[in-house]
Image: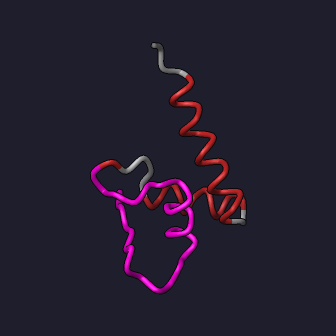
Amino acid sequence: MTFTFASTSTTVTDLYFVRLRLGDTSSGTARFQDEEINNLITTYGNRYIAAAVAAETIAGQYASRSD
């Protein structure tokens, strides 16, 4: 499993787009691996929808936590 994000990149790939939308830009606190994000992009065929589905996944993780 891999993690890639380059904040200095001038090329915005779908992977970088989704990571940026999620705030998932640090390898130390990564919520998703590249393969998972690429799978969402392929499955839904749209980087906006892939980012939304990933955000729902994160929201679900927070919702299942108890106080």
**x%, y% of residue 52?**
67, 51
28 lies left or right of 60? left
Q: Position of residue 10 (x, y in %)?
A: 46, 86
Quarter of the image with the C terminus in it: top left
The magenta region covers: 1-28
Q: Main secondary structure of the magenta part?
A: loop
Outermost residue on the left side: it is 28
On whether residue 26 falls in the magenta region, the answer is: yes
The answer to if 3 sits in the magenta stretch is: yes
Q: Write the residue at 54% across / 63% down.
A: 38
Q: Give the answer, above or below, for where 19 lies relative to 53.
A: below
Residue 14 vs 1, above or below: the answer is below
**Residue found at the far top of this picture:** 67
Numbered label tally: 0
Name the image quarter holding the N terminus. bottom left
Q: Residue at x 65, y 57 (%)?
A: 50
Residue 5 falls in image quadrant: bottom left
Left or right, residue 46 beside residue 32: right
Scheme of image coloration: secondary structure
Q: Position of residue 12 (x, y in %)?
A: 53, 79
* Residue at image location 37% in from the left, 74% down from the top: 6
